Amino acid sequence: MTLSSSSGGPDAAGARAAAISVASRARASGWFRSQTSRRLSFGYLLLAPAVLYVLLLVGAPFVFSLYLSLSDANVGDPVATFVGLGNFRAALESDVFYIALQNSIVFTVVGAIFKGLLGTTLAFLLLQPFWGRKFVRGLVVIPFTLPISISVLSWKWMYDSQFSVINWFLSRIGLIGSYGSPDWPVWLGQPHLALAACIIVNVWRTFPFSAIVLLAGFTSVPTEILDAARVDGTSFMQRFRFVVVPMIAPILLIGFLFDTVFTLSDLSIVYLLTQGGPANATKILPVLAYQVGIQAGALGRGAAISLFLFPLLMPLMILLLRNLRRREY
């Protein structure tokens, strides 16, 4: 017997390395064939269409709008050149931009308050047992499902300065004067009323969404917990505040986030009613971005104005999602 073979020389070391390599490959192939790996692969496969959908319909337009905002792109120019932050600087130097920013914040905050109040009230009413409850629940979603152009044009007729149904009703019950008097409101022609009129239409159209979200949350609360709280002597508001709200907080946060995004980026209602007038009283950021980027043809400046919505929404989204994740643990 040689010294190398008796003491485990190069041949033995090579055999051990080959055995270790074969064992590692076997473990790797075994992991890929395991049930856990198959579940993970199947889960990623199911998520792939949703990820692709988000990347194509959200990510690609966002990247393209970011490219436009950093260039001097115009409708009539075949080539756009890089201008850096010049479009953002031009927006910040405009007085109309600050008016639109203020109107956007007021439009979103006031609308969210009224939609929360009306949605909560309607959800509680729909929880009560009464005849035809299913039919009424179906009617609730009509404002949210109607084509927005038809519903907004109907409201524009109701706000008409001469043939307003709202003014006719208020005049009949004695709250305002007759047509032509100083007490006759011109809803879409007076600056202090125009933004309120747009908020009313936005609330009417989207508060059923808040009611449906709240109704889904209320019905998910076990009745045994509410009965136990009732036995302990809690009032209705105490049960709502300390029992119902903590249990449906994730649903409330997601609903509030969606409603805020929809309201802050809402272009159709304000544009169809007033187009930002009178005297920029109802001009919000989406309307300003549309008028500058599409109607005036300054694509770069319009994209820059629209991207100002992103820093407004991002802190709110981060705060709500962090709070939601903290509640999961």
Image (spheres, rainbow, N blue to C red):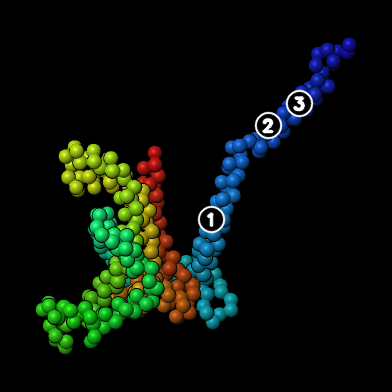
The residue labelled by disc 3 is 19
Q: Nearer the viewer, mark 3 or mark 1?
A: 1
Would you say the residues marked 2 and 3 are in contact, meaning their CB atoms lie under 8 Å apart? no
Residue 139 seen in this snapshot: yes
The secondary element bearing badge 3 is classed as helix
At 66% across and 38% down in the image, what residue appears? 32
Query: In this orientation, which residue lies closer to the viewer: 307 or 329?
Result: 329
From the image, state whether disc 2 or disc 3 is nearer to you.
2
> Which picture quadrant has residue 113?
bottom left
Amino acid found under the numbered disc labelled 2: Arg
Tell me the residue at 45%/80% (across/down): 296
Where 157 sits versus 6, above or below? below
In which quadrant of the rendered view does residue 232 lie? top left
Give the x, y percent position of residue 155. 30, 77
Real-space Cα distance between discs 3 and 1?
43 Å
Q: Could you tell which of marks 3 and 1 lies nearer the N-terminus?
A: 3
Q: How many marks?
A: 3
> Which residue is denoted by mark 1 in the rendering?
50
Which of 88/218 is in front?
A: 218
Residue appearing at x 82%, y 18% in the figure: 9
How far is mark 2 from mark 3, CA to CA?
12 Å
Q: Is residue 88 left or right of residue 211?
A: right
Q: Residue furthest right?
A: 1
Considering only order in the chain, which callout, 2 or 1, is on the residue closer to the N terminus?
2
